[in-house]
Amino acid sequence: MQPNLFNYNLAEIEVSYKTNVKASERKQNITSKDAEEVFRQIWNPCMELKEEAYILLLNRANKVLGWHKISEGGIDGTVIDPRLIFSVALKGLACSIIIAHNHPSGNLQPSKQDIAITERIKQAGKLLGIQLQDHLILSNEGSFSFANEDRM
């Protein structure tokens, strides 16, 4: 006998993706510089105050479907959870993603944690068929691209 679901106190899960941008008007994202430009447009203007992480979702034609703020942390760190990244990527039907976080200190060199999370996200993406194209580290004075440094 099948249980009557209405007898249980359950939360409804809603998944939505809404766009008001025509496919022909989407930014084509090819290089790390293009991605940096997009991230800088959406980033909190106070990049030197606290660490944050964002994601860009891309379709098969490498056009930006949208963006999402993944996390907001403190002065010297933020939690980048692959489950949150891929929940957004799956909802948005992304074929690939680019992630970015900032270093308020201005130091653009990736930390051991930055390297480790990049590898975790890359491996999770392989399992789900969603390629991690790049991981950018931003500061007010520049950027570091894992892809450009052959660290992907």
Image (tube, rainbow, N blue to C red):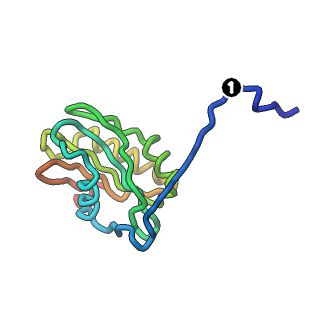
The location of residue 9, given as percent across then percent down, is 68, 25
Q: Residue at x 43, y 65 (%)?
A: 21
Relative to 149, say whether 109 is above or below: above
Tell me where residue 85 sits by quadrant. top left
Which residue is at the far front? 20
Q: Residue 74 versus residue 31: which sits nearer the camera?
A: 74
Mark 1: amino acid:
Asn
Asked whether, in this view, residue 145 is left or right of residue 20, the answer is left
Q: Residue 85 versus residue 120: which sits nearer the camera?
A: 85
Which residue is at the far bottom? 24
Q: Residue at x 23, y 49 (%)?
A: 137
Asked whether, in this view, residue 119 is left or right of residue 92, the answer is left
Secondary structure of residue under mark 1: loop
The location of residue 138, given as percent across then percent down, is 20, 49
Which quadrant: the N terminus?
top right
Which quadrant: the C terminus?
bottom left
Q: How many marks?
A: 1
Relative to 45, say whether 98 is above or below: below
Which residue is at the far right? 1
Q: Residue 124 versus residue 72: which sits nearer the camera?
A: 72
Q: Residue at x 32, y 68 (%)?
A: 30
Tell me where residue 27 sits by quadrant. bottom left
Q: Residue at x 37, y 55 (%)?
A: 56
Other-residue count near label 1 (Cα within 10 Å), few / some / many at <14 / 14–19 / ≥20: few
Q: Label 1, on which residue? A: 9
The location of residue 32, given as percent across then percent down, is 26, 62
The location of residue 76, given as percent across then percent down, is 21, 33
